[in-house]
Structure formats: C-alpha cells, structure tokens
Image (cartoon, rainbow, N blue to C red):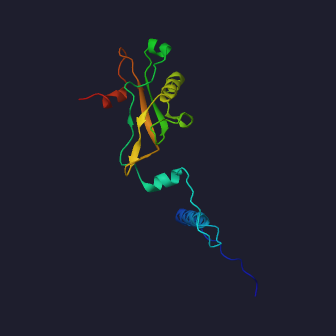
Amino acid sequence: MPLRPLPMPTFTPARAVRGMLLVTWIALAIVAFARCGSGDGAAPREERRAPDVLTQVLSGAPDELPAMANAQPPFRYPVALYAQRVQGNVTLRLYVDSTGVVVPDSTQVAESSGHVALDSAALLGARDLRFTPARRRGSAIAVSLLYPVYFRHPEAQPLPEDSLLTPR
C-alpha cells in the first residue's frame, strides 16, 4: 500500500487568532510560574519594581484623571509663524509620573500640526507642564495620555474644527 501525504490544515484567521491566544497564555503561565520562586521550597523573595505597562492596562483606568496644575499653559507661539498668522493643532502623547511630572524623554507628537515649528514648540512647552497625579483607589499612579495643544492667532480666521472649541 503506497504512503499518502497527510492533509495540510487550512489556514483561517480564526485559527491564527486562537493560536496566538494560546501562545500568549502559555507565555503568561511561564512568567507567572517563574515568579513563584526558585522551586526549591524557599519562600519567594519580595521585589519592589515599577509596574509595567501591561500591569497598568490590566488593572484598569484611574479613578481620577490628572489635571494640569500650571496657572498658564507653558507653550510659546513661534514668532515667525505668529507673524504669518499660521495656526495649527498638535496632539502630544505624554507620560505623567506618579508625582505629576511629565517625563520629557517619553513625550512624542502623536498628531502633527503639519508645521515643524509648531510641533517643536509644543514639545518644548510640554517640559514645563505640571499635573496633579492620576489616582487609583486613592494612590497616585503614572499614566500615559494624549494632550492637545492649540496654536491660535487672535486675528486669523478660525480653523474648520474650531467650531468644536467655541460655546454655542
């Protein structure tokens, strides 16, 4: 009797997702088991580390969001663009630590204004932002957030999306 090749399983997106979920659960189980101790019967040692992003995501959103503590926004309109009445919106991704301080190295432009000078001015001003920290169950926590910065010239025409910013 001749040997017949085994049929190859057909690829489906649902099967791929189930496979990825299985691999993820196995990896999490291995990490959890590895953290349980050395396996020699000794009690696991106490470790204090900053919570990783996955832990923060799984533990839920803060009960209280951070609020800007600056009396005035620290953003400076670039002089050349102000003279030309150039306007724009910059959205920054900020990481605010548990004391309310923005971590400067983590600040990124999430959505550009289309003008490098406005984007740079927003990044520079973000260094001076201060917040009351976000809180979860009464404890101050670090969070990542999107922060919009609006550069508007008082004598320029409103931008089309400005109708969302003005009261009716």
Extreme residue in the right direction? 2
| Residue at 29% over, 27% down | 166
Residue 109 percent across, percent down from the top left:
51, 33
Extreme residue in the left direction? 168
| Residue at 52% over, 50% down | 53
Q: Is residue 167 left or right of residue 24?
A: left
* Relative to 11, residue 121 above or below: above
Residue 119 percent across, percent down from the top left:
51, 26
| Residue at 37% over, 42% down | 65
Q: Quadrant of residue 145?
A: top left
* Relative to 151, residue 102 above or below: below
Residue 15 percent across, percent down from the top left:
55, 66
Extreme residue in the bottom direction? 1
**Total residue callouts:** 0
Residue 106 percent across, percent down from the top left:
55, 37
Q: Quadrant of residue 59?
A: bottom left
Which one is in front, 72 or 80?
A: 72
Q: Is residue 8 left or right of residue 142?
A: right
Instruction: Work out which quarter of the rendered image holds the N terminus and state it.
Output: bottom right
Which one is in front, 70 or 75?
A: 70
* Relative to 51, residue 132 above or below: above
Which one is in front, 89 or 94?
A: 94
Instruction: Work out which quarter of the rendered image holds the C terminus and state it.
Output: top left
